[in-house]
Amino acid sequence: MNSVSEPMRRLQDRINLRFRDVSLLRQAFTHTSYVNEQRGARAQHNERLEFLGDAVLQLTVSETLYRMYPDRPEGELTRLRASIVCEPSLVRFAEALDFGQVVLLGKGEEQTGGRTRPSLLADAFEAFVGALYLDQGLDVVRGFLDEHLFAHLPKTSRLPLKDHKTELQEKVQQWSLGPLEYRTIEERGPAHDREFVVIVQVGERRLGEGVGRSKKEAEQRAASRALAHLQEGEGGARENGSHEPS
């Protein structure tokens, strides 16, 4: 079935693009839960497009940052790229384009809040980029990202270059909490779809936990949650006249 839904038509109007092969557009927004409920139908879910879109994003973002910030060293560009293609950023881009109303979900996923699930939205954004690349090529992908992603980046030298791990390290040093340790406590899923569970701790004190498709991604998410935890504690410490978060 190659027809597109009304939300998909509205999305194409919103971004001023028309897919030549609408089956690619439909596949980009087809979640595995929807396919599992379509008995006898030949629907395809979006995981392969997500895989491709991730690579296209990495390339396009890398090239754009290289051109936008010619004086920035490799390490800073790497951190900025990580901040752009991380899940929270992709979720914001997907929400701005109302991707949550476009995805095709199974009934169970729908009932458990799938339309607002961050991982689902980030995956849909990557899958859409992959579909757009196959349908219209890299130049069109660049144009789409220029308008809906890169246009929101600062043009000045004041860049959000700190990643979560760097920021957490600075906070821990500021409060003299001790050395940080990241530990992988679980690996789950098949080899082609592996997930890692990582915790970050100071001594025996666990600060945060993160899940990702690579250890680096899981560490970043663990650091992000640790920062949120420490910032909450910092607010309480200020109220109590203390300098160290609880």
Image (cartoon, grey):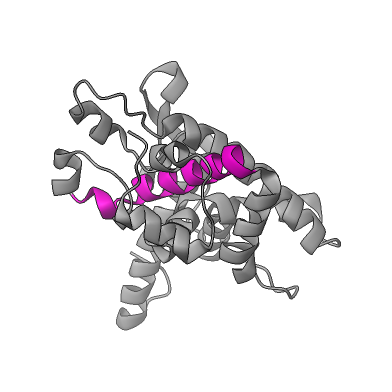
Residue 38 drawn in magenta:
no
**Residue that appears at 46% across and 49% down:** 125
* Residue 53 placement: quadrant: top right
**Residue that appears at 59% across and 37% down:** 134
**Residue that appears at 32% across and 37% down:** 31
* Residue 224 placement: quadrant: bottom left
> Can see residue 12?
yes
**176 with respect to 8 (left or right):** right
Main secondary structure along the magenta-highlighted residues: helix
Instruction: Report the front residue among 96 and 133.
Output: 133
The span shown in magenta is 113-136
Please determine whether, in this image, residue 6 is positioned above or below residue 147. above
Residue 129 drawn in magenta:
yes
Screen quadrant of the C terminus: bottom left
Residue 191 appears at what percent x and percent y?
44, 17
Residue 78 appears at what percent x and percent y?
69, 49
**Residue that appears at 62% across and 44% down:** 136
> Can see residue 219?
no
Instruction: Report the front residue among 234 and 35.
Output: 35
Residue 179 appears at what percent x and percent y?
53, 47
